């Protein structure tokens, strides 16, 4: 299965939660703290390494707060 990760620019996030609804892994949630703009930004809880790097969060985000990284899938080399 594909593995990935995301970096969230918490200071740009206004907490609209579009990414929370779009994430198929359910690993995004609103923070209980505030950013400098007074919003509750999105937090990533990927303690189970469930992120696949699908980038759906980045596609729906109107504020461009996500940077998505995806590990290359390693396929066995045929002999």
Image (cartoon, rainbow, N blue to C red):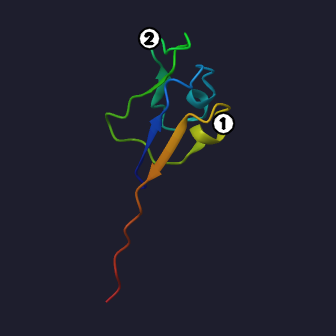
Q: Position of residue 19 (x, y in %)?
A: 59, 31
The CA distance from mark 2 to mark 1 is: 22 Å
The residue nearer to you, when weighing 71 against 25, is 71
Mark 2 Cα-neighbour bin, 10 Å: few <14, some 14–19, many ≥20: few
Q: Position of residue 57 (x, y in %)?
A: 58, 37
Residue receiving disc 1: 60
Give residue 32's mark: 2
Residue 3 place in picture, x, y as percent:
40, 51
The N terminus - image quarter: bottom left
- Find residue 69 and name its label: none
Question: Image quadrant of residue 24?
Answer: top right
| Residue at 48% in and 37% down | 25
Q: Are marks 2 and 1 in contact (CB under 8 Å)?
A: no
Q: Secondary structure at mark 1?
A: helix
In the picture, measured across the screen, residue 58 lies left or right of residue 45, that is right
In the displayed structure, 28 sits above or below 66; it is above
Residue at figure coordinates x 45%, y 16% from the top left: 31
Decide: few, some or many residues near mark 1? Use Cα within 10 Å; few <14, some 14-19, many ≥20: some
Q: In the rendered view, would you say 77 is above or below 70?
A: below
Location of the C terminus by quadrant is bottom left
Q: First in sequence: mark 2 or mark 1?
A: 2
Mark 2 secondary-structure assignment: loop
Look at 64% across and 33% down and name the residue there. Answer: 61
């Amino acid at each position: 299965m594909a593995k990935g990760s995301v970096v969230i620019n918490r200071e740009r996030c206004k907490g609209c939660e579009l990414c929370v609804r779009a994430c198929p892994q359910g690993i995004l949630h609103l923070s209980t703290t505030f950013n400098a703009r007074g919003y509750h930004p999105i937090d990533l809880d990927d303690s189970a390494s469930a992120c696949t790097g699908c980038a759906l969060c980045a596609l729906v985000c109107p504020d461009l707060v996500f940077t998505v990284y995806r590990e290359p899938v390693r396929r066995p080399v045929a002999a």
